[in-house]
Amino acid sequence: MVITESKNFDEILSQLTKGSNIIILGCSECATACETGGSKQVKDLAEKLTENGMNIINQKVLNISCNLLKTKRDLKDLENIDNCDTIISLSCGNGVQTLLNLTDIKVIPGTNTLFVGEEVGSNYFIENCRACGECRIGRTAGICPITRCSKGLLNGACGGSKNGRCEVNQRIKCAWIEIYERLKNLGELDRLYEIQPIRSYSNISKRRVLNKGKQDNA
Amino acid sequence: MPDSKLKKTLDNHNFAITAEIAPPKGTDFKRQIKVAKRLMDRIDAFNVTDFQSASVKASSLGLCIELIRNKIQPVLQITGRDRNRIAVQGELLTASHFGIENILCLTGDHPSHGDNPEAKPVFELESVSLLNTARSLENGVDLGNNQLDKPYPEFYLGAVTSPVYTPLEVQLIQMVKKIKAGAQFFQTQAVFDIDTVRSFIDRTSQMNTNILIGVVPLKSAGMARFMNREIPGIKVPENLIKILENSNNPVEDGIKIASDFIIQLKDENLCQGVHIMAIGAEENIEKILNEAKLN
Ligand code: SF4
Ligand code: SF4
């Protein structure tokens, strides 16, 4: 899922004009799981903004904020939307921009989008995939070197690991030592001797669009 | 192959000596040139660091060109940290134009440890890919499969390795890959313990490559402790730290330790040469050479 953190309240406040008519929209999916855009966070923000002299004219948790068709329907039925001059979106950066595609009203983000991640404990998220577009972890015992090696190396370890830790970040294990150990256990150490071709950046350096259907909303 | 002195020395099975030299954090290369000129007849090549420790300095290519102008042979260190494939290939072609043949390919330290820690790390090419890239240019094609104009560059390629590493097999596999990718010589991280060299050489003898063992003259017990704590792949044995601690002249004793180590490496015929890293005290290289009776 997409991992978010709540923005600092003062930063949100600094983007608003006193007396604005504001609608706060959360998201039922990732932002709810991250406790940044669920009903509680929407309500808390509404209260704090009211205390600071803002008019909160509606608040709602959208059902999958990053789904254009669903959100289009939700906005149509949204009470008070015609009087609104600012929407605060408590979803990830995608959800914020889904709203932008549907309305001319000013939309501002209430979260920082951090990474695509995995929930490994309560309120504990880690990044294991950078969406490189060409998954290669079949060759690296399932461990992603792009994400988990601090230098994103594709051709094996650098010389910097100490006590199995990464030279860049002592709190994490060296991804390439982990890959080595796992491949060894799997009896596939041969794979480490293969020279990996240089990765292509031609796709990921441009905005990516996947259109398997007919319409193109990008 | 053109006339790399380092290559000749290694091909002729003579004991090779390279010395590391860092470009200044500024515009004046006088000190570096002075040190290099004094030692040029005794050293096979001066190995010029590439923004060492991810810190801003004059470039490796710049100092290498200046050395060449003074008829001194350099090893150009090149990392993938700061350059994408376009810049790397351009830099290698430029190096070749100026007569720089020895190229040492390294992955590079992460910028977060340098003096501009907010820099964007590139790492598009790591050591193995850098070697492959240099090879490709030698064959007249760039990484985009475009033909180069003649004459094509010719390089003598090297790489690095770290004998004090657990599990060592990880580094040994990297060495095999680097040889496959074109490395003809290796220089190692600094080693201080002869047993470490013995077992490392034992495990790499099948590779039939040239290994220059890294030698750092210690300046004090404090420096040794700092390196043990902070620098990956460094392990200064306690007995050496004690000697420095009890010494009245730790710098001289550090030089003695380094030269004795070189003498032992040579006597036991353990390696094809040494790579001396004096870390800011390049003036001491001469003393090491004298004490070790090299040339
Ligand atoms: S290789 Fe890594 S970044 Fe790429 S898709 Fe697979 S897990 Fe994600
Ligand atoms: S120590 Fe390991 S994880 Fe860290 S940068 Fe080097 S190879 Fe990658």
Image (cartoon, coloured by chain):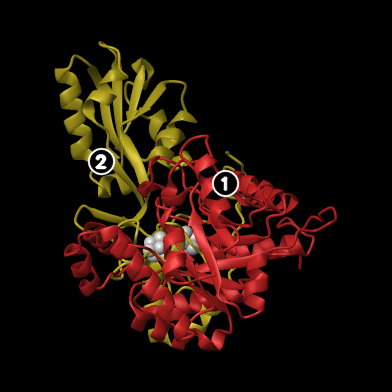
Whichever of callouts 2 and 1 sits on the residue coming sooner in the sequence is 2
Q: Residue at x 63, y 45 (%)?
A: B66
Give left or right: position of B94 versus B147: left
Cα separation, mark 2 vs mark 1, equals: 26 Å
- Identify the subunit bearing mark 1: A
Q: Residue B284 at x, y = what percent?
A: 41, 57
Does residue B275 appear in this view? yes
Given the current orientation, which residue lies at the most extreme right position?
B150
Count how many numbered circles sit on residues in the image: 2
| Residue B3 in which image quadrant | bottom right
Given the current orientation, which residue lies at the most extreme top position?
A19
Q: Residue B242 at x, y = what percent?
A: 18, 69
Secondary element under disc 2, as helix, strand or loop, is loop
Q: Which residue is mark 1?
A: A208
Q: Quadrant of the C terminus of chain A?
A: top right
Mark 1 is surrounded, within 10 Å at the Cα level, by few (under 14), some (14 to 19) or many (20 or more) other residues, namely few
| Residue A19 in which image quadrant | top left
Give left or right: position of A52 versus A185: left
Does residue B232 appear in this view? no
Q: Which residue is mark 2?
A: A36
Q: Which sits in the foreground, B99 or B247?
A: B247
| Residue B148 in which image quadrant | bottom right
Q: Residue A155 at x, y = what percent?
A: 52, 68
Query: What is the three-letter code of the residue carrying label 2?
Result: Thr
Chain B drawing hue: red
Mark 2 is surrounded, within 10 Å at the Cα level, by few (under 14), some (14 to 19) or many (20 or more) other residues, namely many
